[in-house]
Image (cartoon, helix red, strand yellow):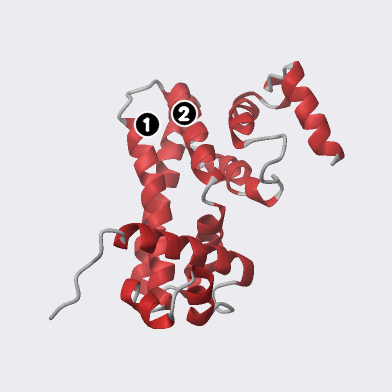
Amino acid sequence: MVRGRSPTYDSQREQILAQAAALFAQRGYPGTSMNEVAEACGLSKPTLYHYVRDKHELLVLITQGHIDRLEAVVHEVTQQNLAPEPRLRRMILRFVEEYADAKNAHRALTEDVRFLEPIDRERVLAGERRVVAAFADAVAEIRPGTAAAAMDKPLTMLLFGMINWMFTWMRPGGTLTHADMAPIVADLFFGGLGAVRLNRKRTRRIARVALA
């Protein structure tokens, strides 16, 4: 008889994916074993295999899940029918919020996607390209001529450079939060350093972080 799924199956699987993503971020995909994933999850190895077939499926689920969430954010914002600049500002805000809790999945996407089987890698990367295209379209609408000059995607990638690697220098629980940084990223992208709006509270926070 086929073994049924427990009511907690989905939540347990999400916990497994979160633990695996953390291990991949710390040790890399090749350096992580299924034994280590099972131990980190407090499960036996046979129990772990009840939730995933193998390590490759873990990587597929982590990277595909991350891209699916980002595409859902793009869809959510697009459905609001905002003008180009408010739309891009909103996407920046929502992506910074999403990345606040997705640094391990994002690291797996950027560093370990090459270990996926070709068909899985192409599917994940196709989703990534759609996300980039949505941002590039907004950039092209805000600054006419960028697409014709083939600068819409390079400008978009510069923007992602600010968003994507925030986790490498922001300290969890520090005085500067992702919510603080989202409008700064948008202001800096749209208007340069002089456009960044500082208030006394934020200035004190940034000064403390810089001196830490």
Q: Is residue 117 visible?
A: no
Check disc 1 and report the residue beneath it: 77
Q: Are marks 2 and 1 in contact (CB under 8 Å)?
A: yes
Vertical relation: 135 (above or below) 142: below
Distance from the alpha carbon under mark 2 to that under mark 1: 7 Å
Residue 80 vertical placement versus 155 (above, below): above
| Three-letter residue code for mark 2 | Arg
Q: Give whichever of 99, 146 is nearer the camera.
A: 99
Residue at 35% across, 69% down? 120
Task: Identify residue for label 2.
Answer: 90
Question: In the image, is 45 to the left or to the right of 163?
Answer: left
Residue extending farthest to the right is 211
Query: Which x, y percent locates residue 196?
Result: 69, 23
Instruction: Classify 173 as above or below 191.
Output: below
- Please tell me which of labels 2 and 1 falls first in the chain: 1
Quarter-of-image position of residue 49: bottom left
Work out which quarter of the rendered image holds the C terminus and state it.
top right
Secondary-structure class at tag 2:
helix
Q: Residue furthest left?
A: 1
**Residue 41 x %, y %:** 48, 69
Q: Determine the residue positioned at 48% across, 79% down.
A: 34
Of 128 and 172, the residue lying toward us: 172
